[in-house]
Amino acid sequence: MTTKNIDLSRRNFLKASASVAAGLVAFNMVKPAFAANVKVKKVNLLKLPTNPIEVAQNSELVQSAWDYLLKQINSLHDTTLRAQVLDLYKNTVPTFMSLYPTKDKVQAVYDKLLQNGLVDPKLTPIDKIFPPLKDLNTLPQPFFSAPGSGYASHHSYPGGLVTHTAVNVEITKAIVETYSDIMEYDANYDISVAGQLLHDLAKPWVFQWQQDGSSLPEYTIAGTGAHHVFSIAEVIFRGLPKDEIIAQACAHNHPGSPKDEAQVVGWIKAAAILAGKDPIALGLLSKDGKTLPTPHKHAGYIVHLGDHDFVLSVPVAKQSVELLKAVAVKEYGFKDNELNTLKFNAFRNYIAAQYSFMRLHSEAANADDPNATVASIAKTIISK
């Protein structure tokens, strides 16, 4: 190759790189930047709202994430699937619970889970198998006010579920688009995105808010958080497509090895038992009931990859709460014995819903004085 050709190649490369960079700038301008654009609503410490629905409604961050999720539901091409997903967002009642109107029915399904090795009575006694449910006509809570996980875990504030889900959906879409762009094949947008949109749909029921401002503790079924199995049970009961159900079931693990696949199979079996359905007849499991149908659809792996916000957001939440406790004591006069009460929980819930643990922690982690930075953030949100 001549020097001229080398120079020309470099020149073309730089020109192409500049075009790509310009395209990326334009692309990033339309990406959802909820935390960056959020406008906080400042309140007085003595007038802190404690109702989780009000806290979520008053958060521009939460409402922006909620609007984003509704847009992603609307982006689904399959109109039937789109309507089913939207209905699940509107109605957070676990309708499969219509199968368990009496204690005898609950006992029977608990015994069936026990016989199949899908529940451990030491971890989940029968009186804890289902969270409280007033009736089938009353929402446990709206989807948009639920926390993203248990109270000591990720996005644990009113509206945390929608911010967590929005992050995971955006990641999932990026994975689908990457395989489409680089490998030039359809990674099944509808099933991947729907699976991610619905992967935590039982959390409004499982993590109901309590009088002290914390959420209900979670128990386990089939070796994972009960919300996962309940979410799968609900989509089985409501008749969603088998590919969506399988993809959603893979959120907590992928079927890439026999051991991993056995976990997914266990979750589907437990969910099918709760939904009163035969997973083999529905095509959710192979004819022997021991594996998933093969070859595996890619959507399950993609949903699993997309559901990894927790890797960062769990430690972020734990560290953020500790930083807020220190600020509450030093700057707002909280007593140590108030740090596990409604007073502090309302304080941390409001700040997190307005600002997010992610943004607060990032700014603290990059500051010379993390405590001073968190104190400064808190003062822009809550006055004394």
Image (cartoon, grey):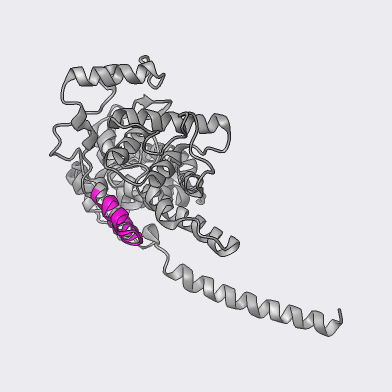
Residue 201 location in percent, x, y? 31, 42
Q: How many marks can you see?
A: 0
Q: Name the side, left or right, on which 165 lies relative to 297.
A: left
Along the line of sight, the residue nearer the viewer: 276 or 228: 276
Along the line of sight, the residue nearer the viewer: 352 or 364: 352
Q: Is residue 288 visible?
A: yes
Q: Is residue 217 visible?
A: no
Instruction: Please tell me in which quadrant of the rendered image residue 330 appears.
Output: top left
Span highlighted in magenta in the image: 63-87
Residue 356 location in percent, x, y? 36, 49
Q: Residue, x 21% and y 29% (percent of image)?
A: 99
The answer to whether 106 is drawn above or below residue 86 in the figure is: above
Q: Residue, x 20% and y 37% (percent of image)?
A: 140
Q: Residue, x 50% and y 61% (percent of image)?
A: 177
Q: Residue, x 53% and y 70% (percent of image)?
A: 24
Question: Residue lying furthest bottom in this view?
Answer: 4
Q: Report the magenta stretch's main SS.
A: helix
Q: Name the side, left or right, on which 149 lies relative to 138.
A: right
Along the line of sight, the residue nearer the viewer: 211 or 142: 142
Along the line of sight, the residue nearer the viewer: 278 or 24: 278
Magenta stretch: includes residue 80:
yes
Viewport quadrant of the N terminus = bottom right
Question: Residue lying furthest right in this view?
Answer: 2
Residue 249 location in percent, x, y? 42, 39
